[in-house]
């Protein structure tokens, strides 16, 4: 076992891990931060995306020891300081960017990483950026719309359910 | 995953020393190796992470005008920093997905030499030089078949040097599910001739299409490839495409790459 320390959502954390401990397992099992999901565990689905030193990374495809000294941001770090939803999260809620919610942590983290690099992405740029994030419910349209809305660009208002 | 030790050296010398142990394995960005370990298809006793070696990261230009990329440089960094070789930067910007590009490295990709990987096409198509901890290897000598390279046990790719052609483009026909190339072609036009490297197609991994190179060196235009074909017998045939289909795509994608390169474009990734 080796000691690992890093900053997660602004807080210094540490623990004893094996060489083979994945970052996502350190987050979920050791830190009990279960917001980051493991969908496929084969590096394909993107549900486990977190930010490591500001970059989107699949937490199931990096060892915890490789994040030594890094600044990690997870979905738990995306809310505002007062606990209200952050801008990307709020846009997902407003525009129905989720159904079952399993892929949502990865989608929100990928969307936030995109907006940091490219504050006003086109629809095509959003779709291309989400190539590594798989959603089996929504068909993606409302996810794209939510990210577009979170960037401050005009989108069609969400449909209102019939009374 | 089987258990293993992890070492995190800070210098090339320490990494080489750590890799002398039997069953030690270098870890680049891990975007192929970690999934492989999870499937228990590899069981090293020790992983030596190259991530912390600052001298193996970054992109620069040498006195000969070559683009020199540290072996531990991520695809994302190459896409941002190799702008003096636009087709190479473009190729790097379309490998995998953003999260993969933020971890995966050029050294890792070339060391693995997946028959459908993108970087081998750029390295072979550019006539790059693969620099290791103890020697320089010409790309023509480096790629030795599917998942096989000239690297010795424990040898690390520290840098890759790319001569910059006057015109180049990468045309990638993707397998829509995996988004790896079903067939992709890197064409580069230098003052002394044209190089054409094909990935995704052959059972021997990346290869140069010599016949097309000769024709294109005389006339750098898509029609120069008319009537030329590769032998389907050595191509990969699977549920995504027969040998004949891949052989056909080699010609089609080569023409498209030449057309794009001649027009000053860098590349296209498509499934049609």
Image (cartoon, coloured by chain):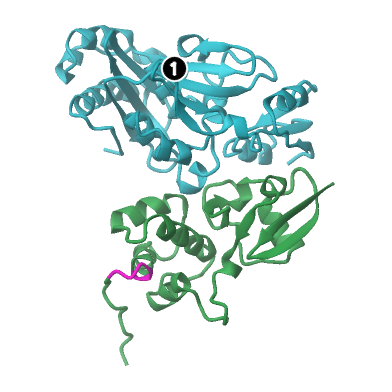
Chain colours: A green, B cyan
Q: Which is the main secondary structure of the residues drawn in magenta?
A: loop
Extreme right residue here? A1
Residue B144 visible (yes or no): no
Please report the residue visible at 55 percent of the width from the left and 42 percent of the height from the top: B103
Q: x, y (%) of residue A4?
A: 77, 51
- Name the quadrant of the C terminus of chain B: top left
Please report the residue visible at 49 percent of the width from the left and 42 percent of the height from the top: B101
Residue B221 visible (yes or no): yes
Is residue A115 rendered to the left or right of residue B193? right
Is residue B183 rendered to the left or right of residue B143? left
Which residue is labeled 1 in the image? B128
| Residue A121, picture quadrant | bottom left
Extreme front residue here? B63
Please report the residue visible at 75 percent of the width from the left and 30 percent of the height from the top: B44
Q: Nearer the viewer, residue A109 or B237?
A: A109
Is residue B264 rendered to the left or right of residue A107? left
Q: x, y (%) of residue B38?
A: 67, 41
Q: x, y (%) of residue B149?
A: 56, 16
- Name the quadrant of the N terminus of chain B: top right
- Mark 1 — on which chain does it sit? B
Q: Magenta stretch: residue B241 in it?
A: no
Q: x, y (%) of residue B231?
A: 33, 12
B213 w.r.t. B74: above or below: above
Mark 1 surroundings: few (<14), some (14-19) or many (≥20) residues within 10 A? many
A125 w.r.t. B110: above or below: below
Q: Which segment did they paint magenta?
A: A149-153
Q: Nearer the viewer, residue B123 or B66?
A: B66
Please report the residue visible at 61 percent of the width from the left and 62 percent of the height from the top: A36
């Amino acid at each position: 076992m080796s000691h690992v320390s890093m900053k997660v959502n602004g807080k210094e954390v540490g623990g004893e891990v094996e060489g083979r401990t994945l970052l996502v397992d350190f987050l979920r099992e050791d830190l009990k931060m279960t917001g980051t999901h493991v969908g496929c565990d084969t590096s394909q689905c993107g549900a486990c995306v977190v930010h490591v030193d500001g970059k989107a990374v699949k937490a199931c495809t990096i060892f915890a020891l490789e994040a030594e000294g890094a600044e990690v941001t997870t979905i738990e770090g995306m809310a505002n300081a007062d606990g209200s939803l952050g801008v990307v999260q709020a846009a997902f809620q407003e525009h129905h960017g989720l159904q079952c919610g399993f892929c949502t942590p990865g989608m929100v983290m990928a969307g936030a990483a995109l907006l940091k690099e490219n504050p006003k992405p086109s629809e095509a740029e959003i779709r291309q950026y989400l190539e590594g994030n798989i959603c089996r419910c929504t068909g993606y349209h409302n996810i794209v719309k939510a990210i577009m809305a979170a960037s401050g660009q005009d989108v069609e208002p969400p449909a209102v359910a019939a009374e | 995953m089987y258990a293993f030790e992890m070492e995190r050296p800070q210098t090339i010398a320490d990494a080489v020393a750590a890799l002398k142990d039997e069953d030690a394995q270098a870890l680049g960005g891990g975007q192929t190796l970690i999934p492989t370990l999870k499937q228990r298809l590899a069981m090293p006793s020790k992983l030596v992470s190259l991530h912390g070696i600052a001298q193996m990261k970054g992109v620069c230009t040498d006195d000969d005008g070559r683009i020199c990329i540290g072996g531990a440089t991520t695809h994302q960094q190459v896409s941002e920093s190799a702008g003096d070789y636009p087709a190479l930067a473009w190729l790097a910007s379309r490998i995998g997905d953003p999260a993969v590009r933020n971890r995966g490295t050029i050294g890792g990709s070339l060391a693995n030499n997946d028959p459908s990987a993108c970087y081998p096409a750029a390295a072979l198509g550019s006539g790059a030089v693969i620099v290791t901890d103890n020697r320089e290897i010409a790309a023509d000598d480096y790629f030795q078949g599917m998942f096989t390279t000239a690297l010795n046990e424990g040898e690390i790719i520290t840098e890759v040097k790319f001569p910059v052609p006057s015109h180049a483009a990468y045309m990638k026909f993707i397998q829509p599910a995996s988004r790896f190339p079903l067939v992709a072609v890197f064409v580069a036009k230098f003052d002394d001739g044209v190089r054409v490297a094909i990935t995704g197609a052959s059972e021997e991994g990346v290869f140069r299409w010599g016949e097309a190179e000769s024709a294109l060196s005389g006339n750098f235009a898509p029609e120069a490839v008319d009537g030329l074909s590769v032998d389907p017998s050595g191509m990969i045939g699977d549920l995504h495409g027969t040998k004949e289909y891949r052989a056909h795509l080699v010609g089609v994608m080569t023409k498209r790459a030449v057309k794009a390169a001649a027009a000053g474009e860098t590349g296209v990734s498509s499934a049609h």
